[in-house]
Structures are given as C-alpha cells and as structure tokens.
Amino acid sequence: MQTCAYKDRRTNDAVDCTQTIWILATNFGSGVIESYYETRLEKIDEKHRHTADLRPLQAELKQAYRTRFGVGDSCDFVGGMSFY
C-alpha cells in the first residue's frame, strides 16, 4: 500500500496526502488519444461520438501513466474528454 507521503518543497515538511486528490495536466498521452480518436471516433456521427465508450482509452492511458510515472495500484485514474 502506498504511504501517500509528500514533502512541501518550500519547508521540507511532510504533508499528509491520504485525503488528497491530485489533478495533473499534461500532454503526455496525446498520441494515445489521437490514435483512439482516429481509429474509433473520427468516422462516427456526432450523436454517437458523445456517447462512445471511452473505457478502453482510459485503460490505455492509465497503463501509459503507470509505466511512465510509476503510479501505484492504489491510485485511480479518471479520464474523459469530448471530441468536437
């Protein structure tokens, strides 16, 4: 199990992160998203595009983030996006 330990960079004090939600913004994974869009969403109509199942994309992104950033099993990944 992860300890959820984090140190404040300004004071070097330990911060209890057991009840913390981290929100990260990055363009890492944009290639995965583009590929998913091109192969599964680009050619379907707008109505079906907005109700398309994104779980396979979420799983692929989750695995890519875990591989790249070492995110542990106790962390959860929530991803969702609209393609217009």
Image (tube, rainbow, N blue to C red):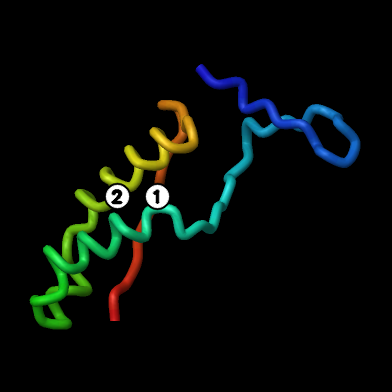
- Per the model, the C-alpha gap separating discs 1 and 2 is 7 Å
Return the x and y of residue 25 as percentages of the image width and height.
53, 58
Above or below, 13 relative to 62: above
Tell whether 68 sits left or right of 49: right
Query: Residue 57 shows which numbered tag?
Result: none
Q: Which residue is mark 1?
A: 78
Return the x and y of residue 45 as percentages of the image width and height.
10, 81
Q: Residues within 10 Å of mark 2 (few under 14, many from 20)?
A: some
Return the x and y of residue 31 as percentages of the image width and height.
31, 58
In the image, what residue type sits under mark 1? Answer: Val
Q: Residues within 10 Å of mark 1 (few under 14, many from 20)?
A: few
Query: Residue 58 shows which numbered tag?
Result: 2
Tell whether 17 sits left or right of 68: right
- For the point 47% across and 30% down, the residue is 70
- For the point 12% across and 64% down, the residue is 40
- For the point 72% across and 30% down, the residue is 16
Element on which disc 2 rests = helix
Pointers 1 and 2 in contact (C-beta within 8 Å): yes
The furthest residue to the left: 44
Element on which disc 1 rests = loop
In the image, what residue type sits under mark 2? Answer: Gln
Above or below, 1 relative to 32: above
